[in-house]
Amino acid sequence: MNAPVLEIDDLTVDFHMPEGVGCAVDHLSLTVENGETIGLVGESGCGKSMTALSILGLIPQPFGKVRFGSIRYAGENLLTAHSERLRRIRGSEIAMIFQEPMTSLNPVLTIGRQVAEPLMEHKGLNKTDAYAEALAWLEHVKLPAAREQLSQYPHQLSGGMRQRVMIAMAMVCRPRLLIADEPTTALDVTIQSQILSLMMGLKEELGMGILLITHDLGVVAQMARRVVVMYAGQVMEEADVEILFEQPFHPYTQGLMQSIPRGLKDDRGRKIRLNEIPGNVLPITEKVGGCKFSTRCPSVFETCINHHPSLKTISGGHRVRCWLLDDPDRRR
Ligand SMILES: Nc1ncnc2c1ncn2[C@@H]1O[C@H](COP(=O)(O)OP(=O)(O)OP(=O)(O)O)[C@@H](O)[C@H]1O
Ligand SMILES: [Mg+2]
């Protein structure tokens, strides 16, 4: 059998800051099989983006460092790969889409040039062929008046149009793995669902694996086959999407479920969250002896405060990091 397109094992990422060392990703493991979509969810600051950035060697410098672990792309350890090899993989075999396209699009280059460039750089196409292929992709992602947009600059496009350009840029080299970090959060709901169905269609067409990062479980329910729930740098629960929604075990997952927006929208058409989980995510420099969620957990008991729980398999692919597994009578 082929190696999974992405296999992260025990990844640990620290920030060495003047005020102390903080752990942003804490012994995290996850696998994306060829052609499957994995949702990585969790509140703001739990380490989702740092996990994504680690894959392509893009952790913020000078403070960020991988302390431990391995990241394998189709069996090849990216953490020990040469920088030239990483550069070749980035953008051609592994593509990334970010929440805010303006941070990834170059404001002084035309749309046509930005979509054509990966084809010239990675696939050796000449300029004419690269621009023709770029136009075909812009039409494929349904960018309105695609031909006219080739000579436009990013600021001349709307947010939804820029996101389509980002997707075209990510797809031109037909990647085997797409990392999408909050790809639709900044968009209004109608555009969001258009972009999500576009991504699903391209996934089927290209057979790529997707690591979909979001804090929105509604998006995950639509897109992913399996879900990894992250808190304070750690995996708290992992399960097939149906199991996670029907039988969430971890109090943190249950809290996230209760905060799923249910169709209510604000005056700009964005979803309104109902309940937030009380309390805040701990700063990464804070050391916790027991379970990292114990400071906010509604079911906390003594063991949770003093002992660190490990991730245990409860059935098939369902894994949970929680002391309630050993003491189910305490569940609320
Ligand atoms: N450049 C940096 N220097 C120091 N700490 C950082 C830096 N970037 C991120 N962190 C810390 O790393 C932790 C994880 O951040 P990360 O960006 O991965 O969170 P996230 O889950 O992607 O959140 P969000 O949903 O808001 O995007 C956070 O606690 C953050 O404070
Ligand atoms: Mg993030």
Image (cartoon, rainbow, N blue to C red):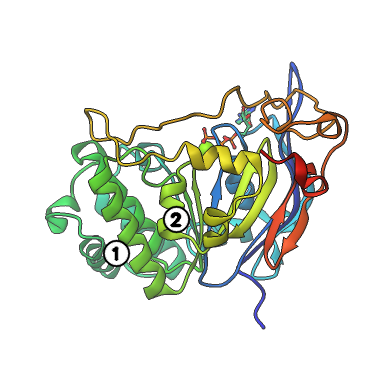
What numbered label is drawn on residue 156? Answer: none
x, y percent for residue 53: 59, 45
x, y percent for residue 83: 65, 54
Q: Residue furthest front?
A: 329
Q: Name the one closer to the observer, 82 or 41.
A: 41
Q: Is residue 123 above or below residue 266?
A: below
* 271 sits left or right of 12 in the view: left
Task: Measure how far apart labels 2 and 1 are at the Cα level.
Answer: 41 Å
Q: Is residue 279 above or below residue 142?
A: above
Residue 201 in sight here: yes
Name the N-terminal-most of marks 2 and 1.
Answer: 1
x, y percent for residue 135: 22, 63
Q: Name the one closer to the observer, 48 or 254.
A: 254
Q: Residue at x 66, y 45 (%)?
A: 250
* Mark 2 residue type: Ala
Picture quadrant where residue 262 is located: top left
Q: Is residue 161 above or below residue 3?
A: above
Does mark 2's beta carbon lie closer than 8 Å to ligand 1? no
- The quadrant in which the C terminus is found is top right
Q: Residue at x 47, y 36 (%)?
A: 259
**Residue at the disc numbered 1:** 127
Instruction: Give the crowd class for mark 2: few <14, some 14-19, many >=20 residues within 10 Å.
Output: some
Residue 110 in sight here: no
Q: Quadrant of ligand 1?
A: top right
* Mark 1 residue type: Lys
- The quadrant in which the N terminus is found is bottom right
Q: Residue at x 75, y 23 (%)?
A: 286
Picture quadrant where residue 167 is located: bottom left
Q: Residue furthest bottom?
A: 1
What numbered label is drawn on residue 221? Answer: 2
Q: Secondary structure at mark 2?
A: helix
Does mark 1's beta carbon lie closer than 8 Å to ligand 2? no
